[in-house]
Image: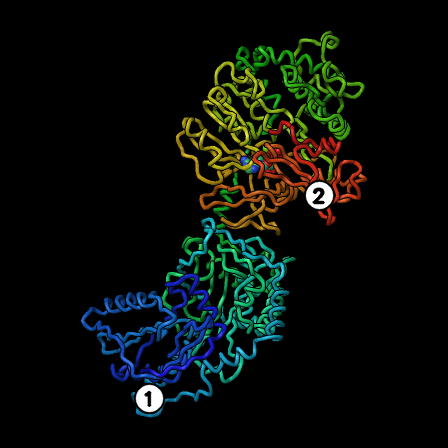
Amino acid sequence: MTSEWTFPASFAQERVWTANQLDPGSPVYNVSAPWRFPAGVTAAQAVEVLAQVVARHESLRTHLRMVDGALVQVVRAAEPLELPELDLTGLPAEEQERRYAETLTELARTPIPLDAPPLWRARLVRFGDGRLRLQFVVHHAVFDSHSAVLFDAEMAAFARAALTGAPADVPELPIQYADFAVWQRDQLTGDELARQLAFWRDHLAGAPAVTGLPLDRPRPTQLGFAGDEVRFALPDGLLDRVGQLAAGTSATPYMVLLATFAALLSRLSGDPEVVVGVSTAGRDTAELTPLIGMFVNPVALRCDLTGDPSGAELLGRVRTGLLDAMEHGQTPFQRIVEAVAPHRDPSVQPVFQTALNFIPDSGLDPVPLGTTKDDLAFDITGGTSRLVYRTDLFDRATAEQIVARYLRLLAAAVADPATRLSALPLLDDAERAVLLTWTGTGGEVAPTTLVAEMERQAAVTPAAVALVSDGVELSYAELAVRANRLARLLVDRGAGPETRVALLLPRSVDLVVAILAVLKTGAAYLPVDTDYPANRIDYLLTDAEPALVLATPQTAALAPTGALVLGPTTAADLRDADLTDDDRRAPLRPEHPAYVLYTSGSTGRPKGVLVEHRAVTAYLAWARDTYPGLAGTALLHSPVSFDLTVTGLFGPLTAGGTVRLAGIDTPAARAGGPPTFLKVTPSHLPLLDDALSPTTDLVIGGEALTGEQLAGWRAAHPEVAVINEYGPTEATVGCVAARIAPGQPVPAGPVPIGQPTWTTRVHLLDAALTPVPPGVVGELYVAGSQLARGYLRRPALTAERFLPCPYGPAGERMYRTGDLARWRADGTLEYLGRRDNQVKVRGMRIELGEIESVLRARPDVDEAAVVVRTDTGEPTLVGYLVGPADDAGLVGRGGDGGWVREVGGGVGEVCGVSSVVVGGGRGI
Ligand code: AMP
Ligand code: MG
């Protein structure tokens, strides 16, 4: 009967035990420490060498067991050892190595149950040259990385002794591991433990729970442990330079490696703060140094990377953070977890998901276990370093890329510690070159005007049907005549280049004629939706300072005095004659604005986007080429106050096609057969029956699109091209698009937005305006000919959103969209949402801040917050208000003074605020 002694388990053993319970049968905590015996050592001596090491260290004779709900370590007395043998002597040399590696991997991947002694596995391997090797795999519960160094040294000492007969040169062991565990239990209790936990609670308060790294696959809802590793060596001399930098700044090389890792994580995730796992050796006193056992304790290093610090400054922050963390490095990690993350998210490791270890003098070459605890973990050594990664999150190629990026950052940071983080290179030259081809180098389109384009088309197809509306059909020639007549009148009333003409007209033939007429004068048209509340209309007409307002007798009441009301009285003034540059107040040029469209403004005032002829014509040149359906019949159903109407209106009129004007829910929309071209928002998709469904091109835009939204329609219409078109009004209708060709299946999940249009260049940039690598979330910036001139009479706002572009020719501007996206590996863009509070409700662009500031301006409202609720099916805007009283019937008082739910569905109307139109709006 073997003698046994029981002791309390250490905190580290407890942690490993608990982790093991979560993933039983996993070899994740196996440590391999294979060893080569010197020549001349016999098999019997080899066994004895290991037996002596095992006899010295109780930890190698320890296993764990639950006794009355408490974990204990059970130490057994030393016994004679027997080792299984593997004889490779008969095999060719190369085959011997292969078999050796194979069997070692097998051994390393075989789980070692914690509750049965011993917690290691060993095998003696005979090679053809007479040499012996030991395959040794040991559970982390009794062995850490410093133990590996000790193991190596003691094996060598006993082997030398066996060969020479001299006593082995090994230090006396004053205490054993169990003594440490008992001492630790005594120390870390009561006030001391509470004090340490208080530190960690405070230190980690508000820290990001998950580092938002770009993953190759969505994170599974249950934590996975499957892992692999990328091995690499630090380039020659790099570690020396790391050491020199550290020495010069009273930091350690580990701190330099950590700071660089934090920088990498921050650059990849876009997070200004990251939490990294670091290991404390846990051997604070001299007696612990010679003990084999499990001492390391992971703690969290919280890194603040805000303010784009230089490498040197970041190193200082990491140094302070790490020293702080180390000072509290004895706090059992499990207790930290319980204290800061009591509600466990089953999909992620708590507190940190990435780690970096530095084992400078490790001779160890651990066997890949095929499993890992962390999303990403670097083990950096002077020899073989490795990045271990979760295979359910990352592809191997991505892990290799992460290693390359890390080394690139490290080399650059060490070369010049004054470099700011944002300026450290993540990309190499080849990657940058590829990215440039993705950002779009589009051929230019010769600048022209909409007027010239439409006149060119009318000359080619004068008799073709240009417009169908309300039972009226107009040929290109007839449309031109009407437009010219009205244009002459408008010129007489002051319309001309750099002026604006507001159109208070319902959707009708007259509206189209008026648009063409305004364009012919050289003025920009400002469409005003006649359904808007009166004070919104007033706002537009005041803000835009139109030279002229056009109305019909029906809408005249909405118009200011002096408006030109189209009707019998104006008919007499009309003259049939083409309008040329000689008739205009000034020659029309591509740089003159063609239209002004108002979009929601976050400060409470909608702003007018001024779009020039050259931008529209550049877009249309691309659109005509991409959407052949524009040469057929386009069903135009959207209000002209939204720029997606541009495609279905000017597209056909510059391609010889027909515009059919009809509301999407009217019989007229379905009369005359299905259109060839239709443009909708995703929310329209359910309405598209056979009569409405286009036969050539279905363009979907304005909001994020998923494969699931599209699947049903696509199944019924496989022969039609479907295009996801992305674009803010400021970059003219659509500037990035993805085409799903006829017959091509619809992807599951988000449909990418694709690639830039011909003249567009897009840049995906981080906060410091540095291009982000593929896979990394960046903000989308748009440059090129499709950019609007800016916001009408709002130079400050224009300067804020239209910035000088550092990545184009001198003088180039880029528009900051506020949209987040990432490059997929194939060079297409994926849309990921907004970085601000702009939302889309049924295709309508709304700045929540606009509604909030209008609500706040009311005397009975102190605070307001507006959100979009999607849980009710149809997205609705809901305002939450706080105010002093509920006398206006507006504000209910919350018992605790918190937000009070007020209204849904029509915040604007309920509050009597009509500069904001929400709910009931015909959004598109
Ligand atoms: P608007 O100026 O009304 O066209 O709105 C532009 C905004 O709508 C963009 O900045 C995006 O946030 C969103 N958007 C437009 N098209 C798409 C699309 N295809 N996918 C995702 N979001 C889109
Ligand atoms: Mg748009």
From the top left corner, tell me how far across and down residue 710 is, in percent.
47, 32
Please say whether residue 155 is visible from this viewpoint: yes
Q: Which callout, 1 or 2, points to the residue nearer the camera?
A: 2
Q: Secondary structure at mark 1?
A: helix
From the top left corner, tell me how far across and down residue 723 is, in percent.
49, 31
Relative to residue 889, is residue 712 drawn left or right?
A: left
Identify the residue at horizontal 37%, vertical 79% (top origin).
Answer: 61
Q: State which quadrant residue 548 falls in.
A: top right
Please say whether residue 727 is visible from this viewpoint: no
Nearer the observer, 780 or 757:
780
Which quadrant contains ligand 2?
top right
Q: Is residue 446 above or below residue 852?
A: above
Nearer the observer, 440 or 868:
868
Q: Which residue is mark 1?
A: 161
Q: Is residue 191 above or below residue 207?
A: below
Local crowd size for mark 1, using a 10 Å CA cut-off: few (<14), some (14–19), many (≥20): some
- Give, as a three-letter code, the residue at label 2: Val
Residue farthest toward the front in the current orientation of the protein: 68
Residue 900's disc is 2
